[in-house]
Image (tube, helix red, strand yellow):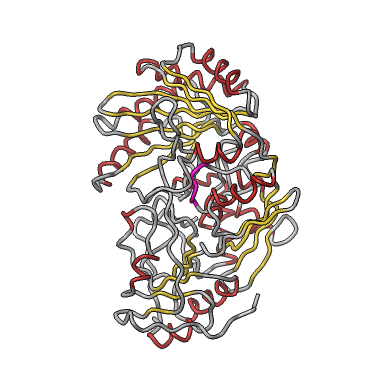
């Protein structure tokens, strides 16, 4: 989820240590074949027909009810039409394959999990779902903050075997199941990159559909801004291309519309940029300087070179607030960028660390490696128009509302090249705001309610300065207006036009 977001969330760590994602990533499950029926795990039928044919408010407990639920014979017949495996409740592979990143959603019970190996698998699944009144839910990384890539009674289409990354000198074509690190691992040796977030195994498709804030957003814009076209399977099973010249409504929706997009993305074509060596810096500051750090960072953004990026971490542990900053620049510029930031803050850092690395080594550093274990967490966000004194005060009040709980607020920039696109040019509406704030709390003992109580309190503290929220940090029970602003109506019309029966599951109803 998104993702990391899955996204640009960097954990604060000891000075000089590697920065890692607060929200880590789900491991890939092992491949399987055939269909495992419920309560008869020894019975497995392998598909013999090899086809060549060519994600109102956010739901807290999504589900899908079938009007003509398929029996075992129907499932077996369906399995014979697809090349990937079909797992049903009761099988060992099903118990593994249905899991999302956050254990909070382990109780979800999809009707089946299809490990798709071709676009035709997805088309045939759409047809089967329509025949039996089922919804389909696409899963790539499985990082949705509300478990949006699975639901009770749905057919989950696991995209992770569709993960190829190919490129030309100026473009990259990424299949929907590729994780963010896999994209960089494929492109970096060729001197290319697509700007993304930092969590290694957040799925590229879900992340892109939500916009995609990352360490190169100030330089190049959001990940979705790099899109040239997408391949979709629509609810009727047809495979189509979306671009400025074909199905332009879908192309508009795919750039920020998240799971409201009425179809399943199978691949994406991006414009690429040069993958050059990167410099990083990390600064920590005294607790009493938190306000100065946040305000100074906002001032620094107003004049900082677009090639410079930094975000602020406000970590609260045991009632003690620890501010820090992580920055990324072209190699050799990290010292200059940090010096300008320190001048804007007006407080000397307690510790500082500076390093230059290759592009791919920087990706690994920022991601804390290339994978991580499943994690219980709760997150949310607010979008801040201007980091003025009122906003800074409200954000700090939001953090401190956690009391003795250990929490983090992460301030990411939304300026630079993000502002080069108008708010109506794509579904992503936040083109004139300065920053996003991610509210984040690990939940090691499963106390989700207490964590959400804090995030609700944090939202209330910043309500006077918040323009909305970032959809890749989606929360249950929140109005879609918070994520899409003035673009909600157009999104709703597009979804109604292409998916009036809501065949494609989404935790958000635009």
* Residue 59 % position (x, y): 38, 56
In the displayed orientation, state which residue is furthest to the bottom: 73
Relative placement, left or right, of 156 versus 43 is right
Q: Which residues are magenta?
A: 198-202
Residue at 52%, 70% in the rendered image:
116
Residue in the image at 57% along x and 16% along y: 340
- Does the magenta run of residues contain 58? no
In the rendered image, residue 167, in percent from the top left (x then y), is placed at 70, 54
Residue 136 appears left or right of 49: left
Position of 120 with respect to 503 (left or right) is right
Could you tell me how many numbered marks the image carries? 0
**Picture quadrant where residue 175 is located:** bottom right
Using the rendered image of the protein, determine whether residue 324 is visible from the camera's viewpoint: yes
Q: Position of residue 508 (x, y in %)?
A: 45, 56
Q: Dividing the picture into quarters, in which one does residue 10 lie?
A: top left
What main secondary structure does the magenta stretch of the protein show?
loop
Q: Position of residue 67 (x, y in %)?
A: 40, 79
Looking at the image, residue 155 sits to the left or right of residue 91; the answer is right
Identify the residue at horizontal 58%, vertical 41% (top origin). 360
Residue that appears at 44% across and 67% down: 156
Residue 503, above or below 436: below
Residue sitting nearer the eye, 505 or 301? 301
Q: Which one is in front, 107 or 284? A: 284
User: Do we see residue 477 in this rendering?
Assistant: no
Rendered view: 325 above or below 473: above
**Is 200 included in the stretch rendered in magenta?**
yes
């Amino acid at each position: 989820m998104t993702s990391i977001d899955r996204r640009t969330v960097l954990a604060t760590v000891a000075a000089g240590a590697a920065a890692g994602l607060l929200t880590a990533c789900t491991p890939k499950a092992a491949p399987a074949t055939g269909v495992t029926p419920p309560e008869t795990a020894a019975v497995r039928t392998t598909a013999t027909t090899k086809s060549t044919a060519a994600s109102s408010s956010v739901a807290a407990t999504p589900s899908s009810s079938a009007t003509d639920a398929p029996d075992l014979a129907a499932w077996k017949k369906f399995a014979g039409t697809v090349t990937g495996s079909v797992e049903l409740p009761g099988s060992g592979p099903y118990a593994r394959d249905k899991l999302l990143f956050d254990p909070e959603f382990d109780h979800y019970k999809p009707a089946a999990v299809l490990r798709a190996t071709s676009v035709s698998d997805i088309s045939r699944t759409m047809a089967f779902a329509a025949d039996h009144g089922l919804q389909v839910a696409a899963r790539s990384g499985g990082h949705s903050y509300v478990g949006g890539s699975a639901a009770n009674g749905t057919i989950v289409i696991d995209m992770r075997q569709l993960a190829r990354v190919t490129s030309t000198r100026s473009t990259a074509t990424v299949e929907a199941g590729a994780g963010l690190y896999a994209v960089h691992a494929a492109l970096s040796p060729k001197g290319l990159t697509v700007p993304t977030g930092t969590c290694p195994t957040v799925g590229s498709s879900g992340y892109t559909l939500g916009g995609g804030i990352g360490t190169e957003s100030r330089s190049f814009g959001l990940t979705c801004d790099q899109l040239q076209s997408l391949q979709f399977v629509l609810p009727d099973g047809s495979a189509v291309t979306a671009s400025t010249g074909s199905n332009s409504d879908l192309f508009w929706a795919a750039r920020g519309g998240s799971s409201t997009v009425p179809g399943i993305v199978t691949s994406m074509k991006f414009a690429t940029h040069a993958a050059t060596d990167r410099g990083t810096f990390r600064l920590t500051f005294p607790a009493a300087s938190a306000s100065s750090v946040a305000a100074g960072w906002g001032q620094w953004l107003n004049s900082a070179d677009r090639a410079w990026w930094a975000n602020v971490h406000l970590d609260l542990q045991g009632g003690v607030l620890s501010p820090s900053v992580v920055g990324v620049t072209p190699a050799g510029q990290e010292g200059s960028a940090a010096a300008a930031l320190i001048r804007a803050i007006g407080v000397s850092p307690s510790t500082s660390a500076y390093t230059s690395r290759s592009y791919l080594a920087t990706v690994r550093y920022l991601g804390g490696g290339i994978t991580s274990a499943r994690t219980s967490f709760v997150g949310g966000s607010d979008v801040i128009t201007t980091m003025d004194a009122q906003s800074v005060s409200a954000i700090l009040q939001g953090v401190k509302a956690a009391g003795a709980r250990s929490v983090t607020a992460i301030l990411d920039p939304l300026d630079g090249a993000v502002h080069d696109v108008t708010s109506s040019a794509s579904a992503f509406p936040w083109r004139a705001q300065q920053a996003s704030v991610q509210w984040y709390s690990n939940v090691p003992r499963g106390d989700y309610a207490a964590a959400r109580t804090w995030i609700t309190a944090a939202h209330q503290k910043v309500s006077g300065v918040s323009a909305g929220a970032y959809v890749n940090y989606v929360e249950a029970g929140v109005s879609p207006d918070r994520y899409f602003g003035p673009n909600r109506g157009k999104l709703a019309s597009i979804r109604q036009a292409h998916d009036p029966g809501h065949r494609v599951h989404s935790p958000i109803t635009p």
